[in-house]
C-alpha cells in the first residue's frame, strides 16, 4: 500500500503550524513535493512538525531533506519537531544523532526514544598526489567518523602547506552524515583557506548532497570551488585551474 506525503496548516495562539505527514517510504523521490511545502513560507516563528507515523522506511536522503528544511526554519526563527518514529526511522535518527540539532525528538505515543552512543560508522580514504589531496567518502557517517576523517584530513594537508594545494572531494559513494557535520565542514573549510588551499572540486551524486554542502562553501573567500557529477570532469577542472594533476 502506498501512503503519500501530505500536510496541513493550522494557526495556534497566532503561530502558524505546518504539519507534514511523511510517506511510507520517505526517500529522495519526495524531494520536490517536500520542498514545495516550505520553499515559499516567510512567516516568522512558523512551527513545523514532521509526523513519521506512516513511515516504515526513512532514507539518508530524507535526513538531508530535513536538514535543508531546518536551515529554512532557522531563517524564520521557527521550530521543528519530529514525532511518532517507528523502528527503522528511529534507529536511523539514533545513529545520526539528530537530537543534537532539533529542539525535540519525541513520539506522541507512549514510547521511549533512546539516543545511544555509536561506534564509528562508515569509512573514508585520503590520498595525496603532488599538491592534490583526494578524500573519498563511503556509506553513511556518524559523528565519530566525521571527527576521525577531518583530523586525518588536517594531518595530511599539513604536508602540502608550503605551496598552494587543491582538494578533490568524492561523495559518489557517500550516504550523508549527522547534522553537526555541517558545522564541522565549515570549520574545516576556514582552516583550509588559512592554510594555502586554492581550489576544491566536489563530486556529488544528487541535488540533495549539493544543496546541503553549498552553504559550507560560503566560508571560502579565496578558494575557488565547483561541484561535479563525475570524476573525470572534476579532475580535468583541477588540472586546468592549478596544473597539479
Image (cartoon, grey):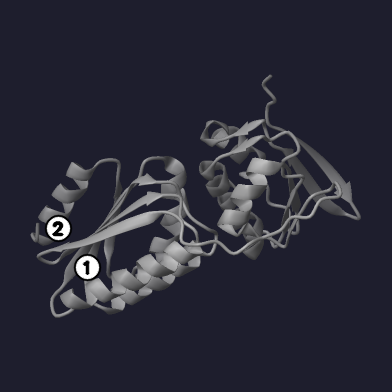
* Residue reaching furthest to the front: 119
Does 3 sit left or right of 218 as displayed?
right
Q: Position of residue 70 (x, y in %)?
A: 62, 55
Secondary structure of residue under mark 1? strand
Taking the image as shown, residue 195 lies to the left or right of residue 35, namely left
Position of residue 243 measured from the top left corner of the image (x, y, whole percent): 8, 59
Residue drawn at 63 percent across, 65 percent down: 100
Determine whether the residue tagged by mark 2 lies in a helix, strand or loop. Answer: helix
Disc 2 crowd rating (10 Å Cα; few below 14, some 14-19, many 20+) is some
Location of residue 31 (image quadrant)? top right
Position of 171 with respect to 98 (left or right) is left
Cα–Cα span, label 2 and label 1: 9 Å
- Mark 1 Cα-neighbour bin, 10 Å: few <14, some 14–19, many ≥20: many
Residue 89 lies in what quarter of the image? top right
Q: Are marks 2 and 1 in contact (CB under 8 Å)?
A: yes
Which residue is drawn at the image coordinates 79% and 55% (left, top)? 112
Provide the residue designation for mark 2. 241
Q: Nearer the viewer, residue 231 or 68?
A: 231
Residue 160 locus on image (x, y percent): 17, 74
In the image, 61 versus 80, the foreground residue is: 61
- For this orientation, the residue located farthest to the top is 1
User: Which quadrant holds the C terminus?
Assistant: bottom left
Residue tagged 1: 198
Q: Quadrant of the N terminus?
A: top right
Amino acid at each position: 500500500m502506498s501512503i503519500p506525503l501530505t500536510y496541513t496548516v493550522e494557526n495556534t495562539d497566532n503561530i502558524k503550524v505546518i504539519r507534514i505527514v511523511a510517506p511510507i517510504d520517505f526517500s529522495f523521490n519526495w524531494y520536490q513535493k517536500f520542498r514545495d511545502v516550505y520553499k515559499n513560507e516567510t512567516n516568522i516563528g512558523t512551527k513545523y512538525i514532521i509526523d513519521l507515523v506512516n513511515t516504515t522506511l526513512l532514507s539518508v536522503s530524507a535526513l538531508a531533506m530535513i536538514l535543508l528544511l531546518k536551515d529554512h526554519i532557522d531563517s524564520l526563527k521557527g521550530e521543528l519537531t519530529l514525532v511518532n518514529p517507528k523502528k527503522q526511522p528511529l534507529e536511523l535518527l539514533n545513529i545520526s544523532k539528530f537530537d543534537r540539532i532539533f529542539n525535540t525528538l519525541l513520539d506522541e505515543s507512549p514510547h521511549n526514544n533512546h539516543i545511544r552512543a555509536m561506534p564509528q560508522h562508515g569509512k573514508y580514504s585520503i590520498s595525496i598526489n603532488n599538491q592534490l589531496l583526494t578524500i573519498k567518502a563511503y556509506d553513511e557517517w556518524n559523528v565519530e567518523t566525521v571527527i576521525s576523517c577531518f583530523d586525518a584530513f588536517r594531518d595530511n594537508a599539513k604536508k602540502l602547506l608550503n605551496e598552494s594545494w587543491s582538494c578533490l572531494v568524492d561523495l559518489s559513494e557517500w550516504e550523508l552524515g549527522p547534522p553537526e557535520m555541517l558545522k564541522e565542514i565549515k570549520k574545516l573549510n576556514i582552516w583550509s583557506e588559512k592554510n594555502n588551499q586554492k581550489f576544491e572540486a566536489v563530486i556529488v551524486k544528487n541535488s540533495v548532497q549539493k544543496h546541503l554542502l553549498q552553504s559550507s562553501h560560503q566560508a571560502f573567500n579565496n578558494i575557488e570551488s565547483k561541484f561535479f557529477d563525475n570524476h573525470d570532469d572534476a579532475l580535468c577542472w583541477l588540472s586546468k585551474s592549478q596544473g597539479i594533476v
